[in-house]
């Protein structure tokens, strides 16, 4: 089965193929590591994750490259305010970014490339442009790309830039959304600013050139798919195309994949609106990492998601329902015979699940197919008509489902605790809700009480409950040790 995906460049849904017949070469714009990522960023990273997981499920190999922007105006500004060099400022936010991806169960790309480690490649690309008179140097020593020299400018964002003013420039990383101006490839240093000494002169790279240079370094001058949030389409991706295709005279990326922005409670997310959330904010409020992943992937990537707290609660229940069903399938005694209607329904659900994902990653329909089957499966289990073959068949579908959605394994307590410990280190514990804060430590009396409940469960041979209590204590940092004198415990 092949996957059909909307291509922003051609404005059509197209089959996606690996041009080299081996691995799909994907470049996805990564984070600028000057702060913690917000849920809008993570919606994009999650849908890129869904894309690569679907490709893998369909048996394709993926070579996925992501950049880390570890030098730009905001980083320089923030590092200066914190009075540290940028090389000391960015690592903590890069680390936090990968921790957040792990909390959201996002697969890591095959290659992670930092901008500051690819300066020679960027200098080389700018020199190639300069040789064709498509890059020019200004008096202060910065280099700009000549947009008027690239006649196809605007082909991705479908903006009409006829009559572009030759030589009009923009020299900040924060761009006007509607005007085309020559953009900085290389920025001369301001007094006191960190600089690289290069053949272009001293300075640092612009934001756009890093993605072009690193994509070509790891994927070649022409590759299969470029991904990013819709906010990057213009000017960032348009500029990547202009400078790459001008330098190589080849198609840069054949397929462009853009993830739409989300709203929060019906409004645009912004700090000034007070509805701006990082992943850590939500974990500290007591929302589970799995529910956040499930909600952020619930609506197909080209549709706007309205992120609501009610929605998070509903997704928590939905995840719980799946986990309970999965558990039930593992522990139930099968009926003597296979239930033929259920077998047919399971086949149909499996087909619909795959077809929905292969059809432009329709996550909503893929989920619906599986949830419908959960209802049928539970009804059959209640009626005692769930045969061994039914169980095996349904579990196979759940396994495929989880290869994409990745919510069945319960690591939620671990990630909540992780966020709490982070907040404690950062002096931000007051941002955690009281219920969440209570998890940070249990009193001795609470621990004794739980151990007593576990003993009780063991006496009544309810080993599942006993194990659940042991696990709960472990997640709260309490280790149990069974001995012939009873149970001892210690804090981790
Ligand atoms: Zn980029």
Image: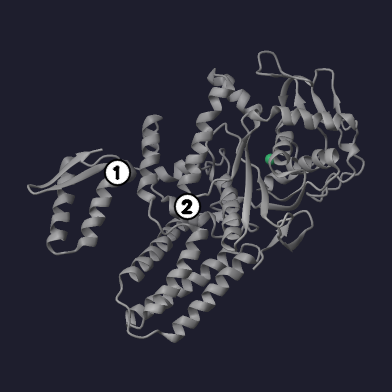
> Which image quadrant is residue 52 in?
bottom right
Q: Residues within 10 Å of mark 2 (few under 14, many from 20)?
A: many
Picture coordinates of residue 332 (x, y %)?
31, 73
Q: Of all residues shown, which one is farthest toward the top?
A: 191
Position of residue 192 in the picture relative to residue 405 (left or right): right
Position of residue 341 in the picture relative to residue 62 (left or right): left
How is the protein colored in the picture? one colour
The C terminus: image quadrant: top left
Say what secondary structure mark 1 lies in: loop
Picture coordinates of residue 477 (x, y %)?
27, 41
**Cα distance, mark 2 to mark 1?**
20 Å
The N terminus: image quadrant: bottom right
Which of these two is toward me, 168 or 99?
Answer: 99
Find ligand 1 in the image and state its quadrant: top right
Mark yes or no: residue 171 visible.
Answer: no
Which of the marked residues, 2 or 1, is nearer the chain's N terminus? 2
Q: Decide: is 21 above or below 169.
A: below
> Which image quadrant is residue 137 in?
top right
Q: Of all residues shown, which one is farthest toward the left?
A: 485
Q: Which residue is mark 2?
A: 292
Picture coordinates of residue 439 (x, y %)?
29, 43
Picture disc at residue 439: 1
Q: Of all residues shown, which one is farthest toward the right?
A: 163
């Amino acid at each position: 089965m092949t996957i059909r995906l909307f291509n922003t460049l051609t404005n059509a849904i197209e089959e996606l193929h690996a041009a080299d017949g081996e691995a799909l070469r994907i470049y996805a714009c990564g984070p600028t590591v000057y702060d913690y990522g917000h849920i809008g960023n993570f919606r994009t990273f999650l849908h890129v994750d869904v894309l690569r997981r679907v490709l893998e499920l369909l048996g394709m190999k993926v070579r996925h490259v992501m950049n880390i922007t570890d030098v730009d105006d905001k980083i320089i500004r923030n590092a200066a305010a914190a009075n540290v060099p940028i090389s000391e400022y960015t690592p903590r936010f890069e680390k936090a970014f990968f921790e957040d991806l792990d909390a959201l169960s996002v697969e890591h790309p095959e290659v992670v490339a930092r901008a500051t480690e690819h300066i020679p490649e960027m200098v080389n690309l700018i020199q190639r442009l300069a040789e064709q008179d498509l890059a020019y140097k200004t008096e202060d020593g910065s280099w700009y790309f000549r947009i008027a020299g690239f006649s196809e400018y605007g082909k991705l964002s479908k903006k009409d830039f006829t009559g572009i003013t030759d030589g009009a420039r923009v020299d900040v990383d924060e761009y006007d959304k509607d005007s085309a101006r020559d953009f900085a490839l290389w920025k001369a240093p301001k007094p006191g600013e960190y600089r690289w000494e290069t053949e272009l002169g001293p300075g640092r790279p612009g934001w756009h050139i890093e993605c072009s240079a690193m994509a070509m370094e790891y994927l070649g001058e022409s590759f299969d798919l470029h991904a990013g949030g819709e906010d990057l389409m213009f000017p960032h991706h348009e500029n990547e195309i202009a400078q790459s295709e001008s330098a190589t005279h080849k198609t840069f990326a054949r397929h462009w994949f853009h993830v739409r922005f989300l709203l929060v409670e019906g409004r645009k997310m912004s700090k000034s609106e007070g509805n701006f959330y990082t992943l850590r904010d939500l974990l500290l409020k007591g929302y589970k990492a799995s529910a956040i992943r499930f909600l952020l992937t619930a609506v197909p990537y080209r549709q706007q998601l309205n992120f609501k707290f009610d929605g998070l609660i509903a997704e928590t229940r939905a995840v719980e329902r799946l986990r309970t069903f999965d558990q039930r399938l593992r522990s139930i005694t099968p009926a003597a015979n296979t239930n033929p209607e259920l077998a047919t329904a399971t086949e149909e659900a499996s087909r619909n699940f795959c077809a929905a994902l292969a059809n432009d990653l329709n996550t909503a329909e893929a989920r619906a197919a599986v949830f419908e089957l959960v209802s049928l499966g539970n009804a059959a289990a209640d009626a005692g008509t769930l045969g061994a073959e039914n169980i095996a068949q349904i579990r196979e579908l759940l396994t495929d489902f989880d290869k994409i959605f990745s919510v069945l394994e319960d690591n939620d307590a671990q990630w909540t605790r992780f966020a709490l410990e982070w907040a404690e280190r950062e002096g931000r514990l007051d941002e955690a809700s009281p219920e969440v804060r209570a998890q940070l430590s249990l009193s001795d009396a609470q621990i004794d009480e739980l151990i007593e409940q576990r003993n009780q469960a063991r006496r009544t041979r309810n080993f599942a409950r006993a194990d659940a209590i042991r696990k709960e204590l472990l997640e709260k940092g309490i280790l149990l040790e069974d001995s012939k004198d009873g149970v001892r415990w210690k804090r981790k």
